[in-house]
Image (cartoon, grey):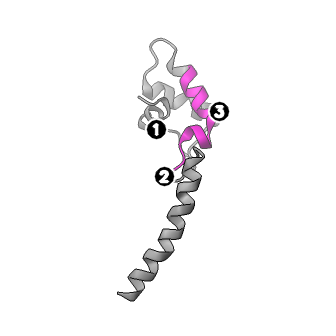
Amino acid sequence: MVGQTAGAVQRGNGSAARERKRDTGAKVEGRKSYAETRPETVQLARELASRPHMSLRKVAAAPADAGHLTANGKPFSHTSVEAMLGR
């Protein structure tokens, strides 16, 4: 029980710092978006998606051809492209 209380006190200090950072408008929690980590890939996906007759799967295949791969070295999936485009 004492260990849980000490942890709560430590988290309290962290949450105050988190709130100060949040007040500046900065992102403080969660995974970084593709727009934050790979803006050039998101821009390419948006340009391709704006073309007529481009499915999400076709848009996902094109960045790999241009050398834009995931952190694991694989092509982006159509669901990743969907998240990039905010659909």
Q: State the mark number for residue 53.
A: none
Q: State the mark number for residue 30.
A: 2
Relative to the observer, which residue lies in front, 52 or 6?
A: 6
Q: How far is disc 1 from disc 3 in space, using C-alphas?
A: 15 Å
Query: Is residue 32 found left or right of 39 in the rendered image?
Result: left
| Coordinates of residue 39 in the picture (x, y in percent) | 62, 35
Nearer-N-terminus badge (2/1): 2
Query: Is residue 3 found left or right of 43 in the rendered image?
Result: left
| Coordinates of residue 50 in the picture (x, y in percent) | 51, 16
Circle 2 Cα neighbour tier, 10 Å, few/some/many (<14 / 14–19 / ≥20): few
Nearer-N-terminus badge (1/3): 3
Secondary element type, mark 1 = helix
Instruction: Tell me where residue 7 sits by quadrant.
Output: bottom left
Residue placed at 50% from the left, 63% from the top? 15
Residue placed at 47% from the left, 76% from the top? 9
Question: Magenta segment range?
Answer: 31-47
Query: What's the amino acid at mark 1?
Result: Ser
Circle 1 Cα neighbour tier, 10 Å, few/some/many (<14 / 14–19 / ≥20): some
- Residue extending furthest toward the bottom: 2
Query: What's the amino acid at mark 3?
Result: Glu
12, above or below 7, in the image: above
Q: Is residue 43 magenta?
A: yes
For label 3, the residue is 40
Relative to the observer, which residue lies in front, 32 or 60?
A: 32
| Coordinates of residue 63 in the picture (x, y in percent) | 58, 31
For label 1, the residue is 80
Nearer-N-terminus badge (3/2): 2
Q: How far is disc 2 from disc 1 in space, using C-alphas?
A: 17 Å
